[in-house]
Amino acid sequence: MDWEHCPDTFGYVRFERCAPQENVNRYYILAWQPTLFGTGAVVRQFGRKGQSQRMLFNEFPTLDAACPFMRAAIRARLRHNYHLVAADTGH
């Protein structure tokens, strides 16, 4: 999948990292959501599967403005051995 360009219809991507020998069973979801104020927010939800989760929001005026932030987050997950398991990117 090409992470250099954000599609106009980006919805979400879900990554998982499972390494039983290291007791690792984590997930990371990155989504684009419209806000009530005509802007949008990058929503990041992550944690250990089956336990409490964290959710963070970063507001951006447009999807294009959020694209570098999302691209950096995706690269970081891939660098940390996460694997793409689901996506709604409009492709």
Image (tube, grey):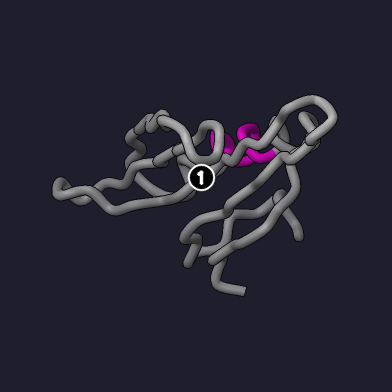
The quarter of the rendered structure image containing the N terminus is bottom right
Is 81 a magenta residue? no
Q: To which quarter of the image does residue 18 belong?
A: top right
Region rendered in magenta: 68-74
Where residue 2 sits in the image (x, y, percent)?
Answer: 75, 57
Q: Residue at x 15, y 49 (%)?
A: 36
Q: Residue at x 15, y 46 (%)?
A: 37
Magenta stretch, main secondary structure, is: helix
Which sits in the foreground, 84 or 72? Answer: 84
Q: Is residue 19 left or right of residue 51?
A: right
Which sits in the foreground, 61 or 48? Answer: 48
Q: Is residue 89 left or right of residue 40?
A: right
How many tags in the picture?
Answer: 1
| Residue marked by disc 1 | 30
Is 69 a magenta residue? yes
Instruction: Name the residue furthest right.
Output: 21
Where residue 33 sits in the image (x, y, percent)?
Answer: 34, 52
Q: Residue at x 79, y 35 (%)?
A: 20
The quarter of the rendered structure image containing the C terminus is bottom right
Where residue 26 sits in the image (x, y, percent)?
Answer: 62, 36
Callout 1 amino acid = Leu
Which sits in the foreground, 55 or 53? Answer: 53
Q: Is residue 33 left or right of residue 27?
A: left
Q: Is residue 49 above or below residue 32?
A: above
